[in-house]
Amino acid sequence: MQPAMLDATILEKLISAAVAAPSMHNTQPWRYRLNPDTVTLEVRAAPERALRYADPMGRALSVSAGAAVFNLRVAVAHFGWDPVVRLLPYRSQPDLLATVRLAASPHDGAGREAPHHGERHDAPHGAPDHDLYDVIWRRHSSRSPFSGRRLPPRVLCELTEAARAHGATLWLAGPEETSRLLRLTAEAERRASGDPRRLAESRDWVRDTGPYGIPAAALGPRDVTGRLPMRDYLGPGPDGRRGGDAPAAAFESHPAIAVLATDQDRRTDWLRAGQALEHVLLLATSYTVRASLLHQALEWPDLRWSLSDAHRTPGHVQMLIRLGYGPVGPATARSGAAETLDGGR
């Protein structure tokens, strides 16, 4: 495919693809800028939408930005350019998380990462086997119960390879490990429900209007058995019961929990984990596999450390992904391209 001409219409499509990425509480903690001289899109942090208590180190923000970078790679490649990515390109600009240059030479897949500043250069390109551009708009978190249908080994293998393409590892937890991961997640939920600052922060992002946050109707039910600790955004109700007035439903008895991890735990690893995460989620969506993210235990340093304790491979867990077959999750609002795109320089 020959590259299209970058005009206002295509630029809007590129930014719209980027902001369709998942982010914690749908904060969309990013903004974009086009450098017209080099035809490069800059992905910058938006600290005003950072989560002060749940994400004080900005790790979840970086993972979200990495997911947006992957969407940009897919969209740029879809329109015929070679997206060349640089992570944290300038130490003097810590808010500049990544750049994506629209190289004139077409390239298969979702582009490559340019070596810079001594960062690891051996990460593969991370190119999907097919164009995932249309899937970007169909990917939604599903917080509903899944069926008991198991994922085919071939699909799991492809998801694992997608994560590996970005220097990350993905594995499906066995029954014993799944129970342990869910216990840690439940402990994180218990702590959050008793932390007034975190609870207030979570409640603040439950919004039925505006382009940010999660509408109450999209929060999903709670597990009637208490086995699967889905995030409780609103906290205990007047009777002190977790989930308050949220409806209860019977969730799958044997949830499939995939663990996404990286060897190191630097900001570049967080950004690569985000690209791996979005690649996995888009590929899963293309196979009608639904997903929701169990991030709660990652928000407490000791619990996050414990997530990796029992696994034979050393590494740093970046996300727990619940996978399965079930209803499509509702779409949540996104900001428009004009709201997140700064003027060029």
Image: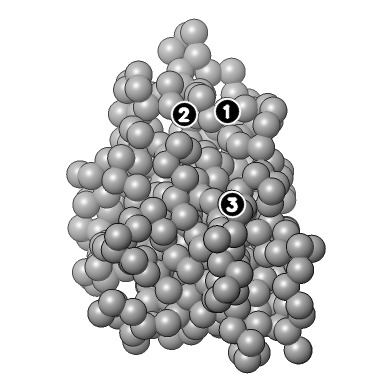
Tell me if 159 is positioned left or right of 59 in this view: right
Please, is residue 257 above or below residue 142 in the view? below
Name the residue that disc number 3 marks. Answer: 342
**Residue 253 shows up from this direction:** no
Quarter-wise, where is residue 174 in the image? bottom left
Question: How far, Cα to Cα, is label 2 from label 1?
Answer: 7 Å
Residue type highlighted by circle 1: Val
Q: How crowded is mark 3: few (under 14 residues within 10 Å), some or many (20 or more)?
A: few
Residue at 39 percent across and 53 percent down: it is 95
Frontmost residue, 206 versus 29? 29
Name the residue that disc number 2 marks. Answer: 202
Frontmost residue, 128 versus 315? 128
Tell me if 114 is positioned left or right of 267 in this view: right
Q: Is mark 1 on a helix, strand or loop?
A: loop
Residue at 34 percent across and 47 percent down: it is 58
Q: Is mark 3 on a helix, strand or loop?
A: strand
Q: Which residue extends farthest right?
A: 9
Position in image of residue 36 (x %, y %): 61, 69
Residue type highlighted by circle 2: Ser
Q: Mark 2 and 1 residues: CB-CB less than 8 Å, in contact?
A: yes
Question: How far, Cα to Cα, is label 2 from label 3?
Answer: 28 Å
Name the residue that disc number 1 marks. Answer: 206
Residue type highlighted by circle 3: Asp
Residue 168: mark in rendering: none
Residue at 31 percent across and 35 percent down: it is 187
Please, is residue 256 above or below residue 248 in the view? below
Tell me if 154 is positioned left or right of 58 in this view: right
Question: How far, Cα to Cα, is label 1 from label 3?
Answer: 27 Å
